[in-house]
Amino acid sequence: MTTTAPAAPTLSRGRTAQVRLQRFGAFLTGMIMPNLPAFLAWGLITALFISRGWLPNGVLGGFGDAGAPGAWQGAATQLVEADDGTTFQQYLGLVGPMVTYLLPLLIANAGGRLVHGERGGVVATIATLGIIVGSTVPMFLGAMIVGPLAAWVMRLVDGLWEGRIRPGFEMLVNMFSAAIVGGALSVGAFFGIAPLVTQLSAWLGDLVGWLADNHLLPAMALVVEPAKVLFLNNAIGNGVLVPLGAQQVVADGKSLLFLVEANPGPGLGILLAYALLGVGAARSTAPGAIVVQFLGGIHEVYFPFVLMKPALILAAIAGGATGIATNVVMGSGLVGPAAPGSIFAVYAQTARDSYLGVTLSVVLSAAVSFLVAAVILRATRERDLAAGESGDLAAAVAQTEANKGRSSAALGALVGDGAAVTHDPDGERGADVARVRVIVFACDAGMGSSVMGAAVLRDKLRKAGAEYVTVVNKAVATLDDSADLVISQRELTARARIQAPTTRHLSVDNFMSSPVYDQVVAEVVAAQDGTAAR
């Protein structure tokens, strides 16, 4: 079957810049997302065991005097100078080493793997240790810079002698080259990059301090809320707010920066307004979207509702600014990133003394965004009733996915099965699937939508008696040719083919309800029964 691919659309300069920023944000997310359990563990340990935690523990929290009578013996300690000039042995604890070493090294390893696989991850980790010990602040930013950079250098070095090593010497060359490059980059990062990143962190911290001193922190909503709708928030959140928030936790035990982007209140208010004052499909789908957004933490489900009426971005900004202002006034914050942005995740990371402030920030931000959205929807309600719809929800979902750069199961659920369109660019639907034993779902970060898609197909195969087929999910950047079939969103299939050029690929628009799944199950079952057409 021969097909002619449509000509690629020409992107405007602004759209091209947006796509590049989205890709940059997706890369940052690829470093952060796989390590979110570690961030959550750090947040929980901080909330429990620091001196202001729920269960203060000097040994685990790192604030106890190891030389006091009856002190715990055998735990790691550090020499600390007291306010009066005397020194004493203080427990090292878990909180400090996790934020200083564990989290940056995990980020660096993830970034290195994205660039140059497992080998890149190892070299990235070695190099990043140099920037960690060369600075006095948590090196999240440094890890995001040095990790991918070190892996890129390793990839260049490997390319110099690829295919030129005499048989039998491959392991020797590979081991020593990685060790030498990693060690050299670690020393270089210690002396050359650590001071620069430390200064950059100081400037960003000073900027946040200046905003706080001039009562301008709520103005961050002017940037963050529109960025969320355009899926440009990853570069801001993972690149700036999370690292700065971690530094504030080390100094103050909490940070409101973790709640600037993750606050579910603004989206909740907008969806409530649609549920009460919207018309047509927008009104009927809003209650379900509330559950996914507020409880599940997938904020992107409210973005199409904003795109249907762009004026609603004012509601999101007003709600976001209200939430930030509330946390400023109440002095409340989180001890770690709330990801996903579910109310459950928010409360799990809330500092012990901040539950009232955080609750008010969510409630008040939702109330303000609801009031502003209600005014806007009420002003256009008669016109919407005459037209039978608040706007074109399907078109808004499509625009949201275009902004995101890939399809989304959560967004596809807003418009039902009708949104599912199967793409098989190479006409491979009739291909022999008798050998299919491993199927990989691929998305940008290897989490979220691909997890849900894998679960759907795995359940269908189980019900069809094909439990022997392994279905897993991965990030596109980590694909290889070990799978028999790769299923990815249409926008990512080209990249997936580059990573796994000899593997069969199928594309879908909706990971939750694509007819591709029934096709794959039918072919697997037919091959299993020996009746597949050849």
Image (tube, rainbow, N blue to C red):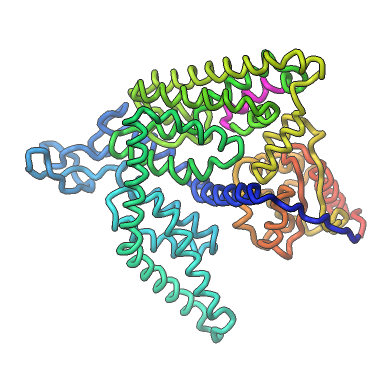
Q: Nearer the viewer, residue 170 or 261?
A: 261
Residue 138 magenta-highlighted: no
Residue 73 place in picture, x, y as percent = 18, 44
- The x and y percentages for residue 293 are 60, 28
Q: Residue at x 46, y 22 (%)?
A: 322
Which span is picked out in magenta? 285-298
Total labels: the figure holds: 0
**One can see residue 474 in this view:** no
Task: Give the quadrant of residue 378.
Answer: top right
- The image quarter containing residue 49 is top left
Residue shown at 44% from the left, 61% from the top: 124
- Residue in view at x 38 percent, y 38 percent: 245
Residue 423 at what x, y percent from top left?
81, 49
Instruction: Specify whether 145 is left or right of 488.
Output: left
Q: Position of residue 264 (x, y in %)?
A: 53, 26
Vertical comparison of 494 with 394: above or below: below
Residue positioned most to the bottom: 166
289 relative to 76 in the view: left or right: right
